[in-house]
Amino acid sequence: MPHVLVVDGHPVDVDVAGLPSLATVLRDQLHLTAAKVACGRGECGACTVLIGGRPTMSCITPAALVREPVETSEGLAEESRDLRARFADTGAFQCGFCTPGQVVHACALLRAGLPTDDEAGRDHVRQALSGNICRCTGYQAIVESVCAVARERS
């Protein structure tokens, strides 16, 4: 069953027969592999993409039901350049498996804006990224990276 998705600004025809997840369509049909399928249950955030600007777990989202534009880590590469550099500079990732999902979610946070108070901003980022599991870093460098980029962009 054909379906049109708008992915990273480009309309693409995809096959949604059998109701594949958006993550499966992105990875297997469009060869966009940054969104990782780890848990397959929407619990870890490794598969996070933006749908209509909102962070969404693509592993549990049926591709056939997606009607709004999809933004992937690949499509956010330019916008997230400073964020990814900050992650690298601060050691905000180690194995890197969760990084694309963290960065995609952080892009949505940065677009929306963070509270100007430093502690409120850190709390906001901690809460917002709580669905993106990282087994390596302890999160502090991730939170500080997002907050630092928010300050630099303002």
Image (cartoon, rainbow, N blue to C red):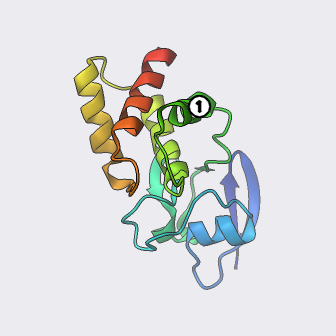
Position in image of residue 135 (x %, y %) = 38, 58
Q: Name the residue rendered at 46%, 74% in the picture.
A: 40
Q: Is residue 50 visible?
A: no
Q: Nearer the viewer, residue 102 or 93?
A: 93
Residue 128, quarter of the rendered image: top left
Quadrant for the N terminus in the image = bottom right
Count of numbered badges drawn on the protein: 1
Left or right of 17, for residue 21: left
Left or right of 133, for residue 90: right
Q: Name the residue rendered at 33%, 47% in the picture.
A: 138
Above or below, comparing residue 106 to residue 60 in the picture: above
Above or below, comparing residue 106 to residue 94 in the picture: above
Q: Is residue 135 visible?
A: yes
Position in image of residue 24 (x %, y %) = 61, 72
Q: Name the residue rendered at 33%, 36% in the picture.
A: 125
Position in image of residue 82 (x %, y %) = 59, 27
Label 1, on which residue?
A: 85
Position in image of residue 48 (x %, y %) = 49, 55
Q: Nearer the viewer, residue 92 or 67?
A: 92
Amino acid type shown at disc 1 = Ala
Residue 117, quarter of the rendered image: top left
Q: Nearer the viewer, residue 131 or 113?
A: 131
Above or below, comparing residue 25 to residue 117 in the picture: below
SS at circle 1: helix
Q: Residues within 10 Å of mark 1 (few under 14, many from 20)?
A: some
The residue sitting at the bottom extreme is: 18
